[in-house]
Amino acid sequence: MPRVAPAVLALDLGTSSVRSALFDAHGRCLRGSSAKQDYRVRHSADHGAVLDPAALLRATRRCLRATSRLTKDSTLTVSGSGFWHSLLGLDRRGDPVTPVYTWADARGARDAMRLRELLDERTVQQRTGCMLRASFWPAKLRWLRRTEPRLFRRVARWVSPAEWVFEKLFAVRACSPSMASGTGLYDLARRDWDDELLELSGLTRSQLNPLEERVEGRRALVFPALGDGAAGNLGSGATAPGSIAINVGTSAAVRTVLRGKTSLPFGLFRFLIDGKRTLLGGAISNAGSLRAWSERELRLPGRAVALEKILRERSPASAGLTILPFLVKERAPTWPEHLEGTIAGLTQATTAADLFHALTLAPFLRLAAVLEQVEGATGRARRIIAAGGIVDSPAALQILADALGRRIEVCREKEASLRGAAIYSLEALGHRIPPPRRGRIMRPGRAAAAQARVARARQESLEALLGKKTTSRDRAPSASS
């Protein structure tokens, strides 16, 4: 295959894999340039969820070797996206002294609760775009300072994993405003780190990378990685008013692009794309990770065609199950950090296939609630574009359409975040990138959508019931008090 002169080398660092590719000046991926490497987050019974930074760097280097063999340019424009909210501590030499604490690590839930006692969460949410919850940096940092003070003191600099990877590969030490806006430490109006939250987290500005949108590296113009959700909307074409992207990968989110200010409902986020555009939406923690758990632990057939058959065939037993899919501590729309995963309605007749179907539907019911919140703030969407790993499963896409009770358009770009990272830099350099061609439409079935509304009502009732019981138990006096 001939070597070419691309416009952009793009990287997408996700929760479970990294991807790379070359793109031309029109935002088209160059044939044969794509590479992918997988890795695994380590989950623990105390709700830890960490990633080995060395494994992340190795995987990225393998991708780059596979991709860069096609380029004849020694200088490139480099752009990227990375998973938001995750935290890595570095020593004075820039080497990791902690694992990557991912967004799914909920061991700081107690510290998040303490922050909500000290501060008004809704005020902080409007200021930073982030909730005072375990997913974000303030709670993680306070948890580490409380539980591992010696380790906390060893850290000279705190970064997102994408910042560290770009530093190692391209000698660039910078944090994009987009990435910073997902930390919970960033003031959206001032476009700077938030002094109050820095102090409460035990940090100084010198322990964070400078905020930069582009940096001239030794051999490349580098655009520090933006948040993967922002890149997803850019890559899927969900950027115009009235368009919403629903990305279903390891986790899932509903997101829409805004220009200007909008009041932020409880449970939703507002992050930056660039200096003119923000992203409003809500994310759930359990999606593709829940499917992977189901396939592994229910010992379902490994072939995709067999799994598609299970999802296409509805059974009365699966319809009778009510599931809170909280294997990882849940986020939007209600942020029930005190609840665990729950299955109600099991009988002797329940099969693994019934469970798989119900576990597939359960997170989509929560996405329906998030969609309603987003549209309540911005108006009813004219286009809902589905992207992420779900596009490989027509049966899951149909279940999503039924759960939403809405038509959805299937994104034609299988790697929307990767393409979005390239578009981000190309637009900044003055290129006008056409949106991707529209994909096929999935329409909800009338009967299936009605069943989904019933299932969603049961799910919300179960969450409310268990939430009350948990709250009552937590507040009950102990025998020794």
Image (cartoon, rainbow, N blue to C red):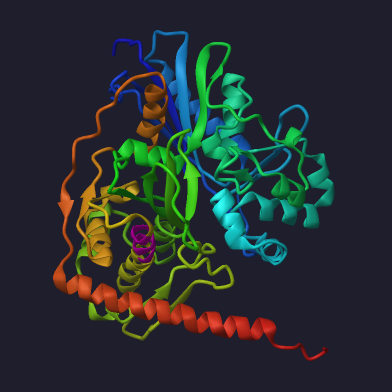
Horizontal side of residue 383 vs 64, given as left or right: left
Q: Position of residue 304 (x, y in %)?
A: 27, 53
* Residue 415 visible in rendering: no
Looking at the rendering, in which quadrant would you find the N terminus? Answer: top left
Q: Residue at x 35, y 37 (%)?
A: 234
Q: Is residue 244 left or right of residue 114?
A: left
Q: Is residue 1 above or below residue 112?
A: above
Q: Residue at x 55, y 32 (%)?
A: 176
Q: Position of residue 23 (x, y in %)?
A: 34, 22
Across and down, in percent, residue 240 comes to 29, 41
Residue plotted at (47% across, 76% down): 342
Classified by dominant secondary structure, the portion drawn in magenta counts as: helix
Q: Tag count in the figure? A: 0
Of 38 and 234, the residue lying toward us: 234
Q: Is residue 64 visible?
A: yes
Q: Residue placed at 16% from the left, 74% from the top?
A: 447
In the image, residue 211 lies in the stretch drawn in magenta? no
Residue 77 lies, in percent from the top left, at 45, 17
The quadrant of the rendering that contains the C terminus is bottom right
304, above or below 278, in the image: below
250 on left or right of 241: right
Left/right placement of residue 110 relative to residue 392 reads right
Pick whichever, 422 or 22, lies toward us: 422
**Within the image, what quadrant is residue 338 found in?**
bottom right
**Magenta residues (range):** 369-376
Residue 385 sits above or below residue 169 on the image: below
Instruction: Quadrant for residue 110, please give it.
Output: bottom right
